[in-house]
Image: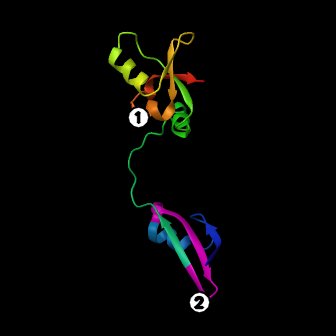
């Protein structure tokens, strides 16, 4: 089956569907089935709208980051247990940056993404 037309609400070929579905209509598609010799008219509708907050650009960057990518994580000197967890997970102390280096996947697993201060 092939789609030949993809129409936005209000374009010719959508007016009856706009009357029927109103603001819920996203698009109308005309699909052609050459084997059966049929043209299908399909509609895409909005089923539900709920509040949503887009991620910040920093969060989007963090989501795209590879699990093995090394990152710098700040951990306060007094957080001995957390420092030990990072060390056990393979983290290395970087005295110049005054931060720990560990793979992004490990930082995520330990719940440290908010403490990431940079990349290596």
Q: Residues within 10 Å of mark 1 (few under 14, many from 20)?
A: few
Decide: is 99 above or below 37: above
Instruction: State the residue in front, 55 or 84.
Output: 84
Q: Earlier in the sequence, mark 2 or mark 1?
A: 2
Residue at coordinates 52% horizontally, 34% vertically from top-left? 62
Decide: is 73 above or below 43: above
Residue at coordinates 56% horizontally, 80% vertically from top-left? 40
Position of residue 81 in the picture relative to residue 87 (left or right): left
Residue at coordinates 53% horizontally, 74% vertically from top-left? 42
Q: Which residue is mark 1?
A: 109
Q: Secondary structure at mark 1?
A: helix
Q: Residues within 10 Å of mark 2 (few under 14, many from 20)?
A: few
Instruction: Please provide percent x and percent y for residue 81.
Output: 33, 18
Q: Does 39 lie within the magenta span?
A: yes
Which disc, if any, is residue 119? none
Q: Main secondary structure of the magenta part?
A: strand
Q: Does 33 lie within the magenta span?
A: yes
Instruction: Please provide percent x and percent y for residue 114.
Output: 44, 26
Instruction: State the residue in front, 63 or 102.
Output: 102
Instruction: Please provide percent x and percent y for residue 102.
Output: 50, 26
Which disc, if any, is residue 36? 2
Q: Magenta span covers which residues?
A: 22-40
């Amino acid at each position: 089956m092939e789609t030949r037309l993809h129409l936005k609400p209000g374009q010719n070929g959508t007016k009856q569907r706009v009357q029927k579905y109103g603001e819920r209509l996203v698009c109308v598609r005309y699909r052609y089935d050459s084997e059966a010799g049929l043209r299908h008219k399909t509609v895409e509708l909005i089923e539900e709208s709920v509040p949503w907050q887009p991620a910040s650009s920093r969060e989007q960057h963090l989501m795209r980051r590879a699990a093995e990518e090394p990152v710098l994580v700040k951990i306060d000197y007094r957080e001995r247990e957390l420092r030990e967890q990072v060390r056990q997970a393979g983290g290395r102390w970087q005295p110049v940056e005054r931060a720990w280096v560990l793979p992004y996947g490990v930082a995520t697993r330990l719940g440290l993404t908010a403490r990431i201060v940079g990349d290596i």
